[in-house]
Image: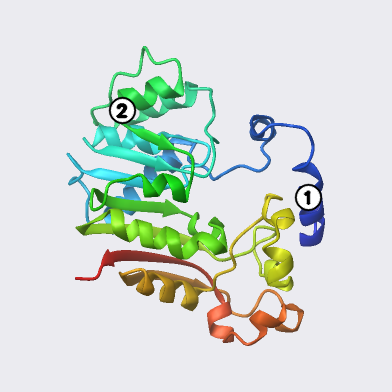
Amino acid sequence: MTLQIPWWGKLAAKIILVRLPLGYAVWQRLGLFRHGQMDTSQYAIRVFNYHAEKAGLTNQLHGKTVVELGPGDSIASAIIAATHGAHSILVDTDTFVRSDISSYHELAHVLTKQGLHVPDLSTCTTIDELLACCGAQYMTKGLASLAQITSESVDMIFSQAVLEHIRKREFRAMMTECNRILRRNGCCSHQVDLRDHLGGALNNLRFSDRVWESQFFASSGFYTNRIRYSHMLDIFNEAGFKAEVSGVYRWDALPTPIGKLSNEFKNFAVDDLCVSMFDVILRRKR
């Protein structure tokens, strides 16, 4: 029988566990506080190909520059991009990638079997050597890293369930920077997960902005910025993007009663709150 931990139990556990004197590498090995699944070969390939297709760049990446926001535990996208002849820049808020490179040799094997030309990684023993071999960059200062990228130098920006994790106070600036670095004919592809990360409902909306945005909560391993669907589309527009929503996933009814939500969310339209995930393509306004 599987033990079902309530959302508040997960919240309390994460608050406690994240403050133990253990590094992120330990939590990785234990399978806790993971940053996505990009360290799984088939998943990483599927995600990269999905966003390339959404951006209209399938088999058209040679010589282009690709930025991934939030690569998490893996630099898999750097290897996949290199097989397509693309230069990649992976941007995160800290160093989260696994130091064990065995998974990348497995990824190279899978890509080779698919008929792709993979850089020779056989002599690589470190992450830095892998990145150099793929002509890729790994930047770990978030917004400050984006600010270092040359204007209008990027052809594709993509992310998989990452935008919701950007701090609310930095979200507009991040979108403005993405617009700045994107070429005029470039494209962004994002999948955004608006569910809480405590059980897949809206329990994160129970808290006031003052509490949720506090450093104590934001550093506890369950933070999302709680920017709702319509508001996020407005921010994309204000940052200079034309948004094309290619998929919207909804709950049939609110998974968390509206009466339990903090006051700032009670006035949102129920139809807006019922959006659990969406896919969006962003292009610079002409």
Q: Going 67% across and 74% down the picture, which residue do you hit?
A: 255
Whether residues under marks 1 and 2 lie with C-beta atoms below 8 angstroms apart, the answer is no
* Three-letter amino acid code at the position of disc 1: Ile
Pointer 1 local density, CA inside 10 Å: few below 14, some 14–19, many at least 20: some
Q: Going 68% across and 40% down the picture, which residue do you hit?
A: 32
Sequence-wise, which precedes: disc 1 or disc 2?
1
Whole-percent x, y for residue 186 in the image = 23, 57
Whole-percent x, y for residue 173 in the image = 44, 61
* Closest to the observer, 205 or 111: 205
Q: Is residue 256 left or right of residue 251?
A: right
Seen in the picture, residue 12 relative to 230 is either above or below; the reply is above
Residue labelled with disc 1: 15
Total number of numbered discs in the rendering: 2
Seen in the picture, residue 193 relative to 76 is either above or below; the reply is below
Mark 2: secondary structure: loop
Q: Going 66% across and 67% down the picture, which residue do you hit?
A: 201
Whole-percent x, y for residue 93 in the image = 52, 44
